[in-house]
Image (cartoon, coloured by chain):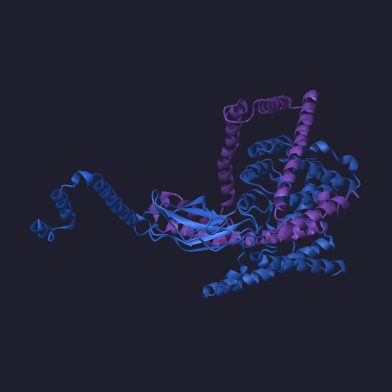
Amino acid sequence: MEEKKRSLGCLFPLTRFFIFLKVYKVKRFITPFLFLLVIAYGANQLQAQIEILLPAPVTEVTVKDKPNDSGESIIVRWKKSLDDGAGSFSVKEYEILRSVEKDGVYNIITTSPAGSEEYIDGNTIDGKDYYYIVRTTDGVNFIDSEPTEAVRSSAQWFHRGRINMLVAAVLLSTFVLWFIRRAQRGEELYIRPIAGLKAVDEAVGRATEMGKPILFIPGIQDMDNIQTIAGIIILGRVARKAAEYEASLLVPTARSIVMTTARETVKEAFTDAGRPDLFDPDKIRYLTDAQFGYAAGVDGIMIRERPAAVFFMGAFYAESLILAETGHSVGAIQIAGTAMPAQLPFFVTACDYTLIGEEFFAASAYLSKESRLLGSLKGQDLGKAIFIGILILGCVLATLGIGWLTTLLTVGQ
Amino acid sequence: MKRQIPLIITFIAGIVMIIQYFIPHEPFAGMQQLFNQWYLIIAAFAMILGIGNLLKIHSGRISRKTSGWGYSIVLLTGLTVMLISGLGWGIERGTFFFYLFWNLHIPMASTMFALLAFFVASASYRAFRARTIEATLLLIAAIVVMLSRVPLGGYIWSKIPFAGDWIMSYPNMAGQRAIMIGIALGTVSTSLRIILGIERTYLGGGK
């Protein structure tokens, strides 16, 4: 027996253990224990294997209240896993877990795709502490980051990213108001002649002489669009001249509110001109909200009524050329004004005069010759001169690789 | 009072909208959305005015049998059928309203849109007549851009696609941005005139 024991000493421990069992005939007692041992050993090995396959965790997890907002939002940022788009390429997504206690229960609030490094939690209660964990997962296994420090969401009283906009708006408003004051004091303000606006009288006069109607199209947008408002303002001026010349004025609209507004505007213009009897509400009519249905309707009016003058004043889209070419085909004098850059080339091509962008917004002031309105145009021009100066300076600085002006002028969202 | 109340409403609404842009805190935070909802409600009710206007004008044309009164019957029939089918059975996919919309309205709208191709051709013909230096430059630029957008341009000379891209990215973009800056300034100026009540033509009247 002693000899057997000594010979076991040079064997592998597990083999030695089996021989020991056989030698001492304890197999039948130890077999269940043996199985358990093997299973535990296997599980241990498997766990070790899994640890090897786990993706690398995210790092540098930071949390902060979302700035310049109305509250209830927290930004969670992290540096993506080394296995995300690199390494073993195993990261499938990130799970964002949130808890109200650092050592409490964390619940998954969302998942972010691989490659992401930020999540904005827009479902928080202001003033309440939150803790976050970013879980990196390959679809089967996962690894968590450390819980973050407490963070609270809150609302801000001022949007700091828009200070530059505030400064620009205040400056421009100051210029406008300053020139309005100067104009009110009786100072002569020179406004450069705009051919398209000088032609308004000519167009209305031509329609009167030919005994044909004037067609005014205020775009296809609703009254919440500044271009439609600008168009309606010009309509008031045109309607006044039409009333003075006793010309017929047709206004087909694509929106009900525009129709009611246009009616009131034309009615008041005719009344102011001393000819309320000439106002016919049925000449300001609603056609349809549908873009091309409206284009077809207006084309029909052009072909049937053969207006002598057509005004396109407002926001237009693809129907612009369809309308303008039809107007051209009936031989009408056409004046267009819009702030839609994509439609301007069509109007320039098909119309006799086109008010480009700012000219369109200046039309009302120009036509009225009212000192306060003309003053606002001068203020606008001064603002433009300053912006041109800033643009040139920005171009020079950017060319020299100096970017502070670009940063300064970037507007926060 | 007829003028004063709308001016006060315009001033308050305008100032609130400006403030909400710079102050994200309540009660200004949801103001834009709230105002938009109010506008949608007003627009929905205004639609009744629009339909009323259509009914009035076209029923009058039918009763007086003015020229083209048959088209007014078509219009009123279409309006009635669409209204009844939409209100009665909904507008979802599979409904009669949806069928009419897809098989009548969309093809007719597409037909109108397709006319644009011919209008572009006729307008281009007029615009590209090289009668002045500017028109000649326009013609050359247009030819280069058009050729750069089709494979033929590259076959003629490999640099044409780059020339087309250059024209669009630099001279064209510069012009577009200049117009955009002018539009932005004009928008601010017009908005200010309306908010402060200097511009009142849209309310009727004005000098």
Q: Nearer the viewer, residue A413 or A197?
A: A413
The chain drawn in purple is B
Q: Is residue B83 left or right of residue A26?
A: right
**The C terminus of chain A - image quarter:** bottom right
Residue A195 in sight here? no
The chain drawn in blue is A
- How many numbered circles does the render carry? 0
Indicate the quadrant where residue A330 lies.
Answer: top right
Relative vertical location of residue A340 with respect to residue B73 in this rendering, above or below: below
Q: Position of residue A135 (x, y in %)?
A: 46, 55
Which residue is most to the left? A3
Relative vertical location of residue A90 with respect to residue A409 in this rendering, above or below: above
Q: Position of residue B103 (x, y in %)?
A: 57, 28
Residue in the image at 75% along x and 45% along y: B38
Relative vertical location of residue A72 with respect to residue A177 in this rendering, above or below: above
Residue A9 in sight here? yes
Residue in the image at 59% along x and 51% along y: B127
Q: Nearer the viewer, residue A300 or A162?
A: A162
Q: Position of residue A287 (x, y in %)?
A: 72, 36
Q: Position of residue B160 (x, y in %)?
A: 43, 57
Which residue is most to the front? A1
Indicate the quadrant where residue A1 lies.
Answer: bottom left
